[in-house]
Image (cartoon, grey):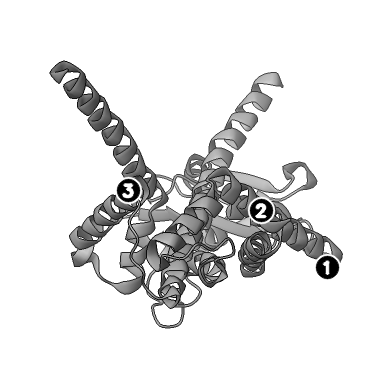
């Protein structure tokens, strides 16, 4: 029995270790945190940002493994949704940047000056696609 | 008499077809005043149709030309070992319909990509569960959460590419500008080696 418990605990720890390091590695590759510190000039606070990510992940684990009910006003969902969206948007932007999408496109099409319009196409496409999905698509 | 000539090749130079390229165009020169005007007017290359759109001028060629011009010249080279001369054959004209086509391609492409992503990661069930955790109410349409999320999605991308803060924080280049620069450098490196190899092959074949 004890051995079974220890084995399960060990496997759980190993799985968590793999997923956690993978998550951090993913964030590092996409360079979201450096980008945010660069924008806000808060390089010195990077330790706290690390902890914010770790604590956020732990809160997410607590929320998804247990079933807590907080009973807060629904308006609290607005900033939560907005910040969550910004994070996912930065992930998506980091991914397109890591894949060199824009430089290749601009070079192929010869439109160095109008690249912002192309970015706006992707940005507006993401917003439109997302709203369409939640408001219409998933209910039909 | 001291005749040290310092040469620093420029990285990239744009040229017109049939243009004659002088040393002054492709390099910075420091030399004694007696010879500097002569050096600046030194003809290095005549662009012809065979060159197509890229010519690599190696510093070795320049040194050779200088030593035929000036005897016992002491040429010191600094910086890049070659200059990439890009011949602009035609002014690239962007056609508007083509641009609009690409715009809509990106628009609908990214809209579909984000929908597939949401479906792939079961975003809907996560959002509904999160809504229940926080408000304690079950709702299959938690739009108060989902619409800010959607707007934030676009905002995050803009933030990453630095268009909101562009005016306030302008010292650093945006990641996109760095990425464009890196891509250009990669292309240049490829061209430098590839084009040189090409010319080597050609002389062997002759």
Tell me if residue B59 comes above or below residue B33 in the rendering. above
For residue B23, side relative to residue A6 (left or right): right
Image x and y of residue B83, in percent: 53, 50
Subunit under mark 2 = A
For the C terminus of chain A, the image quarter is: bottom right
For residue A123, side relative to residue B3 (left or right): right
In the rendered image, which residue does mark 1 sit on?
B96
In the rendered image, which residue does mark 2 sit on?
A105
Give the Cα distance between marks 1 and 2.
16 Å
Give the SS element for disc 1. Answer: helix
Mark 1 neighbour class, 10 Å CA radius: few under 14, some 14 to 19, many 20 or more? few
Q: Is residue B86 visible?
A: no
Going from the N terminus, do you reach mark 3 or mark 2 first? 3
For residue A26, side relative to residue A85 (left or right): left
Image x and y of residue A49, in percent: 25, 61
Image x and y of residue B106, in percent: 70, 57
In the rendered image, which residue does mark 3 sit on?
A66
Give the Cα distance between marks 3 and 2.
46 Å
Query: Are the residues under badges 1 and 2 in a single subunit?
Result: no
Query: Are the residues under badges 1 and 3 in a single subunit?
Result: no
Tell me if residue A3 comes above or below residue A39 in the rendering. above
- Classify residue B154 by image quadrant: bottom right
């Amino acid at each position: 029995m004890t051995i079974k418990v220890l084995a399960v605990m060990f496997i759980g720890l190993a799985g968590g270790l793999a997923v956690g390091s993978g998550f951090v590695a993913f964030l590092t590759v996409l360079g979201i945190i450096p980008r945010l510190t660069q924008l806000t000039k808060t390089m010195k606070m990077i330790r706290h940002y690390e902890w914010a990510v770790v604590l956020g992940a732990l809160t997410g684990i607590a929320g998804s493994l247990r079933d807590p009910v907080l009973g807060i006003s629904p308006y609290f969902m607005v900033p939560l949704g907005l910040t969550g969206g910004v994070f996912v948007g930065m992930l998506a932007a980091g991914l397109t940047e890591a894949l060199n999408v824009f430089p290749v496109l601009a070079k192929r099409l010869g439109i160095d000056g109008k690249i912002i319009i192309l970015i706006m196409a992707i940005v507006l496409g993401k917003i439109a696609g997302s709203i369409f999905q939640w408001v219409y698509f998933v209910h039909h | 008499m001291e005749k040290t000539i310092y040469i620093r090749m420029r990285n990239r130079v744009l040229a017109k077809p049939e243009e004659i390229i002088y040393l002054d165009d492709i390099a910075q020169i420091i030399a004694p005043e007696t010879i500097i005007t002569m050096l600046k007017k030194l003809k290095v290359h005549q662009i012809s149709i065979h060159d197509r759109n890229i010519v690599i001028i190696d510093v070795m060629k320049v040194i050779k030309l200088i030593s035929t011009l000036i005897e016992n010249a002491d040429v010191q080279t600094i910086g890049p070992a070659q200059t990439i001369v890009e011949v602009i054959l035609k002014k690239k004209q962007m056609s508007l319909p083509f641009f609009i086509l690409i715009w809509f391609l990106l628009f609908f492409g990214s809209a579909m990509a984000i929908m597939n992503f949401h479906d792939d990661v079961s975003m809907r069930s996560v959002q509904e569960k999160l809504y229940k955790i926080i408000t304690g109410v079950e709702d299959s349409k938690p739009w108060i959460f989902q619409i800010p999320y959607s707007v934030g999605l676009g905002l995050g991308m803009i933030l990453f590419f630095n268009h909101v803060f562009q005016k306030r924080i302008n010292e650093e280049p945006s990641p996109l500008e760095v990425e464009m620069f890196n891509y250009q450098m990669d292309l240049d490196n490829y061209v430098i080696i590839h084009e040189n190899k090409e010319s080597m092959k050609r002389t062997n074949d002759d």
